[in-house]
Image (spheres, rainbow, N blue to C red):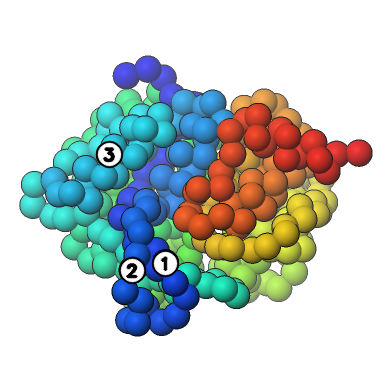
Amino acid sequence: MTNLDVTTFGEAMAMFIAEEPGPLHEVSRYYRELAGAEINVAIGLARLGLKSGWASKVGSDSFGKFVMERLKNENVDISCVVIDEKYPTGFQIKSKALVGDPEVQYFRKGSAASYMRKEEFKESFFLKSSHVHLTGIPLAISEYAKEFASFIVRSVLKKRIPISFDPNLRPALWKSEQEMISVVNDFAFKSNYVLPGLQEGRILTGYEDPRDIASFYLDKGVEAVIVKLGEKGTFYKTSHEEGQVDSFPVERVVDTVGAGDGFSVGFISALFENLSIYESVRRGNAIGALAVQSYGDYNGYPTKQQLDDFMAMYTS
């Protein structure tokens, strides 16, 4: 295994997207894609030329084989993926939304990924990378996955490897909102970069204004906080600067799922080029804009050349 630029971990699922709009129980035809916040980021970074790796467990079933083959084709390192003979790969179904967010139903309880155990993984997979990205989803799917996440964070902190954290709140997966806030914030406080959406930030901090949300985490030692504002762009704040970056024009919103992960792709990739915080956020906004203009969670993520061409159209 070669050293990686970015590693991440979480659950991947087969995703069946409705071919026609309407309630999911009335849809008769679906097409298959791949879903999972962390695999979205790994794929997006690989498309930009970075060496990305993803760790998890998948079942020894057709969905698991689909996950592995798709990630391999996207040049994501899957050497730290465990094949589980007992538990299955999860899946989800997603509606075709003409307006607003699509409806998504998950079938993930008891999935292989929910049984991730630290004893089954190579610590070196993460310790030899230059950056670790995580989300709040593994913290919610099971105690096993949460303990695994704690183990990885403790390990990389000792090596001073930067961590980016997207809360990616999934309230339905938690026993209570109080537990969700407590656990997610505990991980956020240990991260270098925290990337909440505005509503997520309000839930997690109790503050309404993006500046106050950012200050809440900065006061805990976080290096930079980026609050995603949707169509209004993105607010960022560090200990010495702050600002708001406008969103990119979008001709037609097709599917909003994956936009936040696309932002993470842009932001993290910019860190590797030593771009300013402003330019890093702007790149994140660009990929988010591209993501919402195509179906599927990561289908709109660009190559480096496609990204440069898109951003050049809006550079004076």
Of the two numbered discs 1 and 2 on the same chain, state the one appearing first in sequence: 1
- The residue labelled by disc 3 is 68
- Could you tell whether 304 is left or right of 183 in the image? right
Which residue is at 46% across, 26% downward?
Answer: 51
Which residue is at 83% across, 43% downward?
Answer: 314
Which residue is at 73% across, 40% downward?
Answer: 310
Tag 3: residue type?
Met
Is residue 180 among the parts visible in the rendering? no
Task: Tell me the SS state at disc 3.
Answer: helix
- The residue labelled by disc 1 is 19
Q: Is residue 128 above or below residue 90?
A: above
Per the rendering, the mark at residue 29 is 2
On the image, the x and y values in percent for residue 286 come to 69, 46
Give neighbour class at mark 2: few <14, some 14-19, many 20+ (Cα, 10 Å): few
On the image, the x and y values in percent for residue 96 come to 47, 70
Of the two numbered discs 2 and 3 on the same chain, state the one appearing first in sequence: 2
